[in-house]
Image: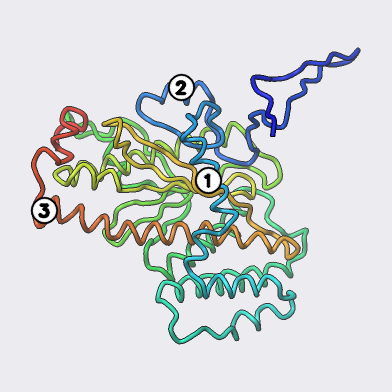
Amino acid sequence: MQQQHDIVSIPIKTKKDIFHFRDATSFLRTPKRPKITTESISILSSITTIISPYNAHLSPGHKRFANQQLIDQTNHVSLKQFPVAYLMLKQALETELASLPHFIWTFTQPDNIATDDVLLLKTIQFVLTDFCNKCHRNAFYQPKYERSYWIDRIIPIFQTFGDQSQLLGFQWCEIPTEEHVEFTIDPDTWMRTTPIKYHDGVGYDINGCSRLVMEGSSSSTLKEDVDHTQDDTIKTLYASIEILTSFLRRYATASFSSLCSVVSYSLQCVCTTITLSTTILDPDNVGSYIQKEMRSVDIPLTFNKCHLWMQVFELVAYLFTSLREQEIILEKVMKESSGVIEIKDEERGLHILNGIIGTI
């Protein structure tokens, strides 16, 4: 298979205009997804590596990772870890709307089903029941604006996931993170130096630590406000880094390798598309961060788009499995930090990050 290289575009001029032709391998920015300008990516590159389709300058390894996430999403890699929930969802999406509620609540699960499989199954049942109800809504009454759509379509998915899994609690609409409040205080005067930033949603764990920041970024469900998208992409990236930095200050005596496994999450909704990203410490560039775009899916509004629920619940399943892994990692970090698990002093985050994170 022969592939063309180094063709940016071929301009063809007509009497009225110039048309720039590109081959199919050309880099194109995906609409309705998080966005950061090339200039901002370059400025941030010394402290943050952004692995996302909107970054046109990814290394070959990072490009392979980004492509693999798209393949994993299409193959439902996370969702298939919950085999009963996966089976029920596939069968549900082949059922007519009139019969769907009955199918959802008469589905028979096996006796030997795993606990987490039950929890995701219940999440799917409640979310799809809500969807069935909304499919009867007159099209004229569908939400047209960002906040209405956020409340009507996005909140129910994640609130239901939190209620069933107990992995996250949520606060909604104009919520600051406690971690952000910390960083608005000047330690010399103990006075607030900058305005507090608010989010459309914050997910926090049983310890009260923020784990997931969420933003709705379009004034309309049909037309993207690109400036708003860019502002909120920067905002969620900044918040996810604040969450990690705050955690570092509390548990700096844990091993650096364990601290590099701690994840903060961000979710951005642009029109009807939601994108989940993760942020971690960069183990190979001490003091820096890596943000990775993991899943990006469209939310179905009508029954003829119900197949989109497969990828929506792939995103939810990814978040579920990742948060379960984080429970183990956070327990290890806390035990290392408190001395229950002994580690060498030179392996501690405090030692490796000395001079970067400041006074603990």
Marker disc for residue 22: none
Marks 3/1: CA–CA distance = 38 Å
Image: 159 above or below 114: above
Mark 2, residue position = 42
Q: Amino acid at mark 3?
A: Ser
Q: Where residue 341 sits: x, y (%)? A: 11, 55
Q: Element under label 2?
A: helix
Q: Is residue 286 above or below residue 156?
A: above
In the rendered image, the quadrant that contains the N terminus is top right
Q: x, y percentage for residue 10?
A: 76, 17
The residue that mark 1 highlights is 68
Image quarter of the C terminus: top left
Q: Horizontal and vertical percent for residue 300?
A: 67, 59
Q: Nearer the viewer, mark 3 or mark 1?
A: 1
As measured in the structure, the alpha-carbon distance from the residue carrying label 3 to the one carrying label 2 is 39 Å
Judging from the image, the colouring scheme is: rainbow
Q: Amino acid at mark 1?
A: Gln
Q: Residues within 10 Å of mark 3 (few under 14, many from 20)?
A: few
Task: State how far apart marks 1 and 2 are (Cα).
Answer: 24 Å
- From this viewpoint, which residue is outermost toward the right? 15
Give the SS element for disc 1: helix
Q: Give the mark nearer the N terminus: 3 vs 2.
A: 2
**184 horizontally vs 161: left or right:** left
Crowd band around label 1 with a 10 angstrom C-alpha radius: few (<14), some (14–19), many (20+): few
| Dots 3, 1 in contact, CB < 8 A | no
- Is disc 3 placed on a helix, strand or loop? helix
Q: Which numbered circle lies on residue 338?
A: 3
Binning the other alpha carbons within 10 Å of mark 2 as few (below 14), some (14 to 19) or many (20 upward) gives: some
**Mark 3 or mark 1, earlier in chain:** 1
- At horizontal 38% and vertical 37% (from top left) the residue drawn is 290
